[in-house]
Image: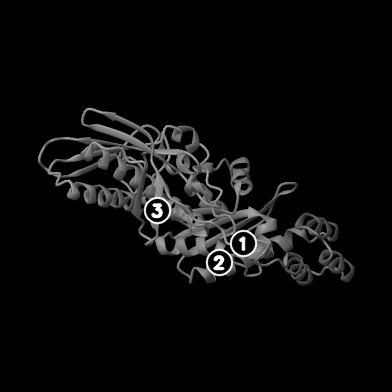
Amino acid sequence: MNTEQRKGFTTGSCASAAAKAAVYMLLSGRDKEEIAIETPAGIRYQTAILEIEKGEEYVSCAVRKYSGDDPDVTNGMLIYAGAKCLQDGNARVLIQGGTGVGTVTRPGLDQPVGNAAINSVPRKMIEKEVREVMDIFDCRDSIEITISAPEGVEIAAKTFNPRLGIEGGISIIGTTGIVEPMSTKAILDTIYVELRQQKEEGRKSAVISPGNYGRQFLFDQYGYDLDLAVKCANYIGDTTDMVRSLGFRKMLFAGHAGKLVKVAGGIMNTHSKEADCRMEIIASAAIRHGASKESLSRILKCLNTREAYEILKKEGIEKECFSDLAKRVQYYLNKRAQGEVDVECMIYMAEYGLLGMTEGAEEILKEGN
């Protein structure tokens, strides 16, 4: 059985193909039912051309987005390109966003504030394909390309775009033209963009949480603006590297005990497939604070951190243990950051609230708000 996952094509590839087809039909006067482009990855992309509309000096058409085996919310949507000849003798390629393509409203993204969210690589791809057709037909006038995605306004609500400051639609993105199934790179790229935006907006400290629960805890407990806390999923080490490389002076790492206990053991990717020795780490803290042999044995048999915490609570050492674990998180993240970032930590649990934190943790929250 073939288990190889199918690759897809980015919105940038779709926009480029649609633009190439639209310009071909505009300059030739003939319909184009299929088109092929070369992606930056060197993989040929051939696709059907849909929704052809022709007007005087204007042609519009669409390409259907195909994401392969990646669970991409844009899969199946139509990406349109309209081509218009300006008859100005300047031979330029002008690219703009239409309906359903977002507008950049915050600094730190690929495009400046006010531009359509069509990233630089797709813009280069579109221009390359359009100029290829212009050369074939010896076109000396400028061509205006409008990329649109009518479903984009609705679909963008399911993406990170509103959080990143892209309003009114989706982004036209892609650096290789290819969609890799469940791309780790795409997640890391999103984390990096959020951090870079905050740095460019003048923030000196980064507040990081593995998930939504951690961010909600910061809001409920401290009134901290959720949009200022960056969600890093399981990528603790990679995110710390980004914080360091971007030049933040301080980092607060706040999250649920189920994730942060792993970091207290030096684990930098907290996905269960990577590592899980939570009970051993909690037991080691319990040993340092005088837990009984019976309690240690029970901790090692626990299925989750809540059960282990309740055992520590019965021993009366839960505060000492989780203060200890917070300091261990601090130690390992400081080590990962090579001493260039002052790291603080908060560990919480939904049922019990704040369990432990390092000395300067609350100060970072006050600075951020």
Q: How many marks?
A: 3
Determine crowd level at label 3: few under 14, some 14-19, many 20+ residues with C-alpha closer than 10 A: some
Tell me: 368 left or right of 313.
Answer: left
Q: Indicate the position of residue 219 as horizontal and vertical percent values.
A: 59, 42
121 in relation to 270, above or below: above
Tell me the residue at 58%/69% (across/down). 332
Tell me: 279 left or right of 33.
Answer: right
CA gap between label 3 and label 1 equals: 22 Å
Determine crowd level at label 1: few under 14, some 14-19, many 20+ residues with C-alpha closer than 10 A: few
Q: Of helix, strand and loop, which one carries label 3?
A: strand
Q: Indicate the position of residue 134 as horizontal and vertical percent values.
A: 19, 46
Tell me the residue at 22%/27% (across/down). 56
> Does the residue at mark 3 contact the one at mark 1 (Cβ under 8 Å)?
no
Colouring scheme applied when the structure was drawn: one colour
Q: Which residue lies furthest to the front in this view?
A: 30
Mark 3 lies on residue: 45
Tell me: 86 left or right of 171.
Answer: left
Mark 1 lies on residue: 3
Q: Residue furthest right?
A: 294
Q: Of helix, strand and loop, which one carries label 1?
A: loop
334 in relation to 97, above or below: below
Mark 2 lies on residue: 333
Determine crowd level at label 2: few under 14, some 14-19, many 20+ residues with C-alpha closer than 10 A: many
> What amino acid is labelled 3 in the image?
Tyr
CA gap between label 2 and label 1 equals: 37 Å
Q: Tell me which numbered mark, 3 or 1, is placed earlier along the sequence.
A: 1
> What amino acid is labelled 2 in the image?
Leu
Q: Is residue 102 visible?
A: no
**Which one is in front, 346 or 193?**
193
